[in-house]
Each structure stands twice: as C-alpha cells, then as structure tokens.
Image: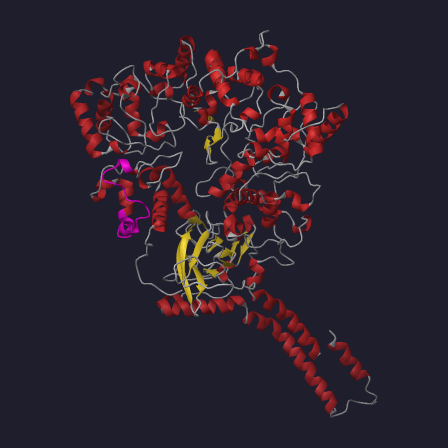
Amino acid sequence: MVVGPSLEELLNSNDQPGPLRSRPSGRELAIFGAVSLVLVVSLAIAPAKNYFSDWRHLQKAYLKLANDRQGGTLVRNFHGGIRQTWIPSLGVVDRCETCHVNQNGALLGSAGQPFRKHPPIPHDLGQFGCVLCHRGQGAATSVEEAHHTTEAWEQPLLPARYLDSSCGQCHLGALPGAPRLNEGRRLLSAMGCVHCHVVAQPDGNVMKPDDNPPPLVHIAEKTSREWIFAWIKNPQAYAASATMPNFQLSDQDAADISAFLIAQSTPSAAVKNAPPTAPSAQPAATANPTEAATLYGSLFCSSCHAVQNAAGNLVGGNFGPELTRVGSKANPDWLRRWLKDPGQYEPDTRMPHYRFDEKQITMLSGFLLAKKDDDLLSKVHLPAANADSVVRGKKLVTESGCAACHQINGVNPPQNFAPDLSRVGSRALSQIVFVPGMKHNVHDYITAKIHDPRSFGPALKMPKFNVTDEQIVALTTALLAQTDRANGLPHELLLSAERKPDYHPGGDAGKLMEDLRCLSCHSINGHGGDMAPDLTREGSSVQRAWLEEFMKNPNTLRPALIRRMPKFNLGPAEIKTISDYILSAYQAPGFDSQTLDAHAMDTDAAARGKQLFYSKYGCQACHIADYKNDKGYVGPALAGVGNRLTPVWMYKWLKDPNALRPGTLMPNLNLKDDEARDLAAFLMTLKAKQNGGAK
Amino acid sequence: MRLQLALLSSALLLPGCSRSSAPKPPAPTAYGIQIAEVSGGKQVAAVGSALPQPVVMQVNGADGNPVAGALVSFRGEGVDFNPAQALSDASGQATAAVRLGSAPGDYQIVAETPKSGGGSAAVTLRETALGYEQKLGSEVNDKYCNRCHDNESTPERVSNFDNLSPAPHLYTDGATYNRISDADLLNIIARGGPALGKSPQMPAYGSTLKPAEIKALISYIRAMADPPYQTPGVKYGK
C-alpha cells in the first residue's frame, strides 16, 4: 500500500506539460522496475507459501519412504493435497491426515511421527475425526498452528497422559480401558470435591459425593477440643490416610473453630437413652491385651479400618476411618456407646450394629484406647473458650465452607460455594489467572490448582488435599472431560453412567438388615457395597441349614481372602428372620426343581463328574474339592459344597455363571447339559465333615 | 530497509536459537569408569505417563567403589527426564523421574557417564508404555489371569501360581510366548489349554471374554514379553 501513493506522487510531481514523453527517464524506469518486482513478489507470496508448506514437504518425505519400502502401488494410489475429515454433525473439520498420512498403517514396518500408524482404538479412525480426542486445531495446515496454542487458538494438543479424558466426553460412566478417567471420577466423589464444586455431565447427571464426612452435631461427646484443634491444623498428622484437606489455619483460627464446634454440639440419642449409671464406672481395660488383639482380628475390623504397623505401612481397609491413634481422639464413654450401637450416635453411619456383650466391649475399647500417640496432643494448650472465640469460630466455619461437607448445628450448607466445574475443560485462558512462570493451558492450570491451591493467592479458600501426583493426573483427566464440545454433542452419542437404584429391603428383616448394615459390604439389586458377594440371587443358591449356620458362625469360603464376614452375635430369632427373607425374596428367575432330573444324579453320574472335574476341566486349578490333594486358591473352596449349594443352582451356575452373577471370575466353560449335571452330581457328594461348615 | 530486514530476521531467529539450547549440565567433580542400574528398569506405565518408580543409576570407579560427583546423562527418544542430567550423590547414585512418550511400545533409556580417560560408559534400560489396547488387556489380566499367571501376591490378591502343576507361564516369559503365534494364543485363551495340548487347568475363556478383549489381552502379553516380542515380517529402519 505504501507503494501506490508514492508512485502517484512521483508521476504528479513530473513538471513536464503536454502528452507523455516517448522515452521515460532512467530514474523512472528504475522505479517502475522496482515497483513491478515488488508486485510480482507480493503476488508470489501465497503460491510460494503453499509450495513450501509443511504438509507438502511431509507428503514428499512420505512418498520417498513409501517408494523405498514397497515401491509403486502405494505411491501410485496416493492422493496428495489437503486431505480432511468433515463431520458436520460434530462440527469436525480435521486436516490432520494431510500430514499424518499413514494412520491406517498402509506403509510396511514402523515409522516415526508424523507417519506413525494409529494404535488400535475401539472406534473406526475417521468416525469422530481427530481433535475430538486429541484436541488441537483440526482445520490448521501448519505444524505450529495444529499442535500448539496460538493467538487465535487456545487449545493445544492434549498430552498423552490425559488422553482418557476425551473418552469421557461421551462415556459418562466407568469405561474399560480408560483407568485414569475412571479413577479421576471416583476421586471427585471419594475425595469429596463435589461437595463444594458442581460437576454436571452433559446428560444432566450431577456427580454425587461418596466420602461420608461425619456429622459434627454431637462432636463434644466423641472427642476433645484439643483433638479437634490438632486435627484441623493438620489432619494427616493424626491419620496418614485422612481425606480431610489441610486448610492451613492459624493457631488462633483453629482455636476459635474448635471452641465453636464444641459449643454447638448437642447430646446424641445415645446419651439421652443411656441408663442412669455411668458406663465409665466399669473398669476400662482389664482384659488381657493379647486376647483383645485376637478379638479385634477375629472380628475382621481390619476389613474396613486400617492401622499403621511398626514399619509405617497402613494395614487394613479404607472403608472406615484409620485407627492408628484413635486412643488420642475417642472419649472412652463415647467409644463404649459407639461399639454398643453406632446408629444411636450417627444414624447414617456405615458401621454395622454388632451385638457385642459387655466383656467384648470392654476388651475392644481397651484395645483401641491403647492406640495412642501422646505427641499429638502434648503441645496443644488452648486458652479457655469464651463467647468471642465461639462467635469468631462460627464465622470462620461459615466462611470456610465446613458445612458443605459436615452437618453442623446452626450453619446451613452453603450453595454454589466453589466454581462450577461442569465445563472446566474448555475454560477460556483469558478467564484464568496464571501464576507467573506457568504454561498457559488448561491442563497445567488444573494440575497446579489441585497440587497447591494457595499458590494462586493466599486468600483463596480451596484447601490443600492430600493427593499423590498420579491422583492429580487422574483428577485432571476427569475434569478435562468436562468440555463445551461434550455439551454440544448429539444426545444419542452420550452413554450415561449406570445409576444405582435406591433399594431397601422391606419388613422386619429389612429393618434388621439395615441395622446390620448388610449393604455396606454386600450388594442387592445393584445397590450396596462391593466388598462381599452379591446377594441378589442368594435365595436360589444356598441351602437353609447352611445359611443359618453361616450367620451364626461365619467361616471362610475363600481361604485366601483377607476381608471376611464378621460375627455379629445374632440371636436365633434374628437368624430365622433374615434366612426366611433371603430364601424367599432373593430368588433367581426361572429356577424350579424340574430343571434337573434328580434320578439322573446317581453315583455313576458323580463318578463321571469327578473325572470331568479333575481331568477334562482341571477345576482343581482354582477350587479345592478335597483339602488333602487340591490347592486351588482362586475360587471358593468346594469341600462341603454339597451342604451349601442347591443342585439346581450348581447346574445353572456351571452352564452360565455370568448370567447368575454378572462380572463373576468363573469362566463360562460351555459345558454340555449332561456334563453340567454330572459335575453337579459330583459336587453334591462333597459333604462337610461336621456342622455343615467348610473347614 | 536492509537494517529493518536484518532486525526482523534476527528477531525471528533469536527465539528459535534460545529454544534449541539445552539447560547447561552441572560440572562433574569426579569421573567413574562404569555405570550400572540400581533400580527402575523394566517398568510399565500408560502412554505419556510417569513411571511408578524413578530410575536410579550408580557410577563406579576403577576400584569398584561408588563415585560421587560424576555426571550422569539420561536420554531416550520421546522420553522426558527430570533431571536429564545429574551428579551422582555421596553413594554414587543418580536418580531421575521418567515420563514415557505418547506412542505405545518399548522405550530404550540410556544412562551415560563420561569416563576419566575420555569416552563414556553407558547402560540401556527398557521401559514399556501401554496404549489403549494394552491397557484394556491389562484390565482383563488383572481380573482373570494374574491370579495364576503372576507369582507375586498383594493384600487383595493371593497368587495361585505356586499351587499349580504344571506351573503357568508368567507373562514376562518372552522366551515361551514369543514362540507362540497370535492365532495359537487366541486358541489357548478361547478354548483352553487342551486346544494346544497344554494343561486343562488353563480354562477356556471363549464364552466369557469378547473377541476384542482377547485381542487386547494378546496385545498386553506381547507388550510384557521379556525379551521383547518382534512382530513377524521384514524389519525396516525408522
């Protein structure tokens, strides 16, 4: 543009009047020549840019490689130029295949990028294009623009470690082959992130927390103000496995909050209903410590609760709180009442109501109270709580959002307390305040935010969670699935998470099963825990005598299992109520005695079945039919199974285990009808030596 | 005009130069003659992910004792190291966290230390990155196979390996698996050991696993093989 006006000026500045001279001066010719050259060069820029483009260069390199390796055919059939996948319904215009020409692996042998063959995935290449999974700028035709953040494009290529997140745009529930996405989503619920943050999925499902933070409405009964102070200052100092985050409180703030929490506490039902004689009148830990430890072990408390061993490793489950230092926390009277009936203190607890006798309670509480760490509270000396301190504490509790997780008297759960993360994966970079030195992209922002929220500003409220680097990658993966694009996808592409139906067993048996918290470990009709076998079809499976004996005295079906059914000390009437209910309500459809011809299950059939068991199918690899010879430790022991299972169940189970218990480890061996019958006949001969139990 | 062009081109070139220059390596204070792996080889992680454990190397001197202050450099195509160069500590060891590249398959990691008399000593480790298909296969393995095909026990899963006779082959047993073709592996998994004259204690999973799951499992077994599995056919350079 600078050229034009200057030319006119030059022409106009010519003083010579009359017609144009026949010969321009040398100076004019030089200017004209220069201007023409500039014009030609500027016109040539576009074709030259095209000619020297990245993709042309790469396509040439590919053709050379193809020619060297397999010659003619591949080269002849190659269509050069810009190649693209266009899917209007998804808004996809992806030109990646212009350079990534060997995605389908037509080239023999392996090749480096950009000619690498695309690894196998469950979808056809081209079904969804490239950027739906890999992000980046699909329509770009230069290497820089396609892969990196530019001024006009904020979303760079997604690093491979977060790739699972792209699956999560359509697959809204658990997905095999995407472990990081699954783990991240589990953590969003299990770490309680979704107490404060809303995470809504494109199908409208809002993620629910799954961490059971304890209510604090009766906390003064349970523990001391000193312990609360130490706990909120640093939860992981009390229990290494604690999920409660560190709010980095000052001593003053922690003292005020502990004062308020004690002040707001009201008496629980356990105290209101307690007998007039104080339970603490009883001797605390009179029991022999070894005997108490044996009791703790035989009750399988460690199925749910972990304790740190001498080497510093946690041993036990993480379903209930860690008990390494519980003696520094629990009030002895409260502990006795809790062991007697936990639901009286916390109606929604997952801890079952054991029928402990007084001796057992004394032994257990003595054993637990001895698990003390004197260093924890020795340095805590709090000034007496006063009204000001309580008022300040209440203000802090309200501002910190404690009630988003915990039930607290006089403080309502806050609404919209933290930013909505439903579309955080597409958050505009202009809306993000980055810490100096940080890379400007969403995934590094999310990672840094989870790692140390206060690094973005000391006044921010988000606390620091106790997470490993791998957990941060998983959480980031789950959050990166929450994109604008996912919300714009056609609804038929969305695969919603399986929702667990709300199931409560009915009647007297139902009340009893709620009291025992059967569903904390077992699942029924898709509802409940996954620690113990599914009971949905238990009634068709087991014999009554075995079931009643098992509830009275649970023994081990799977020798290698650590988590086991505890002994609840149930009375005969309770056992009968539950057995009746299980045997009538939890039936498999299509089970009747006609399924199996009882006469055909004779000794000959049993002998054939034994052959099949040991020789043809090698069942002893996983099961024990005879403790003297067999060693299989994968499936349940089958010694005594003739007293445990019904013949019809065995037959149907052998025919198709997955139909009766989806997800079982037992493979479907494709048995013929008579093979399954003969095997069932053999298994029915495996009777227990005594009392119907598998010893 | 020429000045402007020169300024412009230098402005364009300078960032390019600064990008290509690597951080300056720490100056070694001592030299060893040999480098050896302490731990961190033969690990498995998802593509683009950090290995569960860092790689630890040890530099030894002529007397066989560890050398402190020797420079150890790590390299590997597509692999990130933190740090990429380190001096060995008082016990002669240098440690680096490793993040594998975005392609599934094997990665060769080279740890190198300069020798006192010139030249350098190096050792190569193999690490494996699992892509989508191998991850799916590893989930199948975790659920169905590793109770017998893995001899390590965890608190959640007691190994059944030692209870079996004949003993199952560990998936790392490349010498055995590399000689079995994909088609034969598919047959054993789908129809059980007897399909290939092996033990009936290997059950048939053809009616339990989907064909895609079996294919994924084979791909996982191939990834775990040590020595590494080579696909049949002509080999080409990259």
Residue occupying the point 75% across, 26% down: A391
Residue A529 drawn above or below residue A88 = above
**Residue lying farthest to the bottom in this orientation:** A23
Observer-nearest of B30 and A244: B30
Residue occupying the point 35% across, 29% down: A659
Number of numbered markers: 0
Instruction: Say left or right for A552 vs B74.
Output: left
Residue B181 drawn above or below residue A695 = below
Please identify the dominant SS of the magenta region: loop
Instruction: Say left or right for A193 vs A285.
Output: right
Residue A430 counted in the magenta span = no
Examine the rendering and report whether any part of residue A350 can be seen: no
* Residue A350 percent coordinates (x, y): 51, 23
Residue B176 counted in the magenta span = yes
Observer-nearest of A492 and A326: A326
**Residue lying farthest to the top in this orientation:** A276
Tell me where the magenta segment starts and ends, as one range.
B162-184
* Residue A644 percent coordinates (x, y): 30, 19
**Residue lying farthest to the front in this orientation:** B63
* Residue A90 percent coordinates (x, y): 55, 48
Q: How is the image coloured?
A: secondary structure
Quarter of the view holding residue A148 = bottom right
Examine the rendering and report whether any part of residue B186 can be seen: yes
Name the image quarter holding the C terminus of chain B: bottom left
Instruction: Say left or right for A632 vs B64.
Output: left
Name the image quarter holding the N terminus of chain B: bottom right
* Residue B177 percent coordinates (x, y): 28, 49
Instruction: Say left or right for B82 vs A645.
Output: right
